[in-house]
């Protein structure tokens, strides 16, 4: 089954990427793989502290994921898969694409402010010659109604 890979993070625009991925997957009989990355810099090392911080980060990610997973199951009828990695988000995203040959599309949302599209979008644009699947970039401020329109067909 073809999977759409989407990143779960603390940005407002990730909501649109997740919605887009779930709606497209439902309409194309695909799956959704949700990648969350714990930045290596957030984990302090030494005397068991790293393990506690890692566990706390995983619990936070799983709770955040469950909110979106419930919507995906209830609304478009998609059962998402959560992948948690630790490291640089761009590097881990590329590693996940390389690790799973069933990933058919990477879905990211661009930031809606004037600072640019965001670090992951910028990184993937630089890596496009090496990508093994297409990348879909969803506008971060696209309305829910428009998002549903463009995922229908």
Image (tube, rainbow, N blue to C red):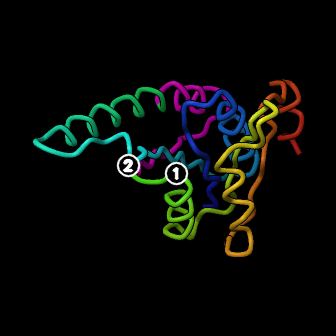
User: Is residue 79 within the magenta segment?
Assistant: yes
Is residue 72 or residue 91 the one in the foreground? 91
* Residue at the outermost left position: 47
Q: Is residue 37 left or right of residue 1?
A: left
- Name the one closer to the observer, 104 or 48: 48
Dot 2 crowding, Cα within 10 Å, few <14, some 14–19, many 20+: some
Residue 111: image x %, image y %? 74, 36
Going 74% across and 51% down the picture, which residue do you hit?
A: 28
Provide the secondary structure element on which disc 1 rests.
helix
Q: For the residue labelled by badge 2, is the local secondary structure a helix, a strand or a loop? A: helix
Q: Which residue is mark 2?
A: 40
Q: Could you say where residue 31 lies in the image, as x and y percent from the top left?
A: 60, 50
Q: Residue at x 79, y 31 (%)?
A: 112
Residue drawn 28% across and 40% down?
54
User: Which of the image's four quarters has the N terminus?
Assistant: bottom right
- Bounds of the magenta segment: 66-85
Image position of 86 (left or right of 68)? left
Query: Residue placed at 68% from the left, 67% from the top?
Result: 127
Q: Is residue 98 above or below residue 149?
A: below
Tell which of 20 and 10 is nearer to you.
10
The quarter of the displayed image where residue 72 is located: top right
Based on the picture, tell me whether residue 88 belongs to the magenta stretch.
no
Residue 72 is tagged as none
Left or right position of 1 against 28: left
Tell me which label, 2 or 1, sits earlier in the chain. Answer: 2
* Above or below, 128 relative to 8: below
Q: State the separation of the CA atoms marked 2 and 1.
A: 9 Å
The residue carrying mark 1 is 89
Tell me where residue 133 appears, x and y as whole percent: 70, 67
């Amino acid at each position: 089954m073809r999977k759409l890979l989407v990143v779960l993070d603390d940005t407002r625009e990730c909501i649109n990427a997740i919605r887009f991925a779930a709606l497209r997957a439902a309409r194309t009989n695909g799956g959704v793989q949700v990648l969350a990355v714990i930045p290596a810099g957030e984990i302090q090392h030494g005397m068991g502290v790293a393990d506690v911080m890692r566990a706390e980060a995983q619990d936070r990610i799983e709770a955040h994921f469950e909110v979106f997973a419930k919507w995906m199951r209830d609304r478009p009828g998609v059962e998402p898969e959560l992948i948690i990695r630790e490291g640089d988000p761009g590097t881990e995203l590329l590693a996940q694409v390389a690790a799973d040959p069933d990933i058919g599309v990477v879905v990211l949302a661009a930031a809606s402010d004037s600072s640019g599209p965001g670090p992951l979008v910028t990184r993937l644009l630089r890596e496009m010659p090496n990508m093994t699947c297409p990348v879909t970039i969803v506008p971060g401020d696209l309305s829910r109604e428009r998002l549903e329109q463009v995922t229908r067909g």
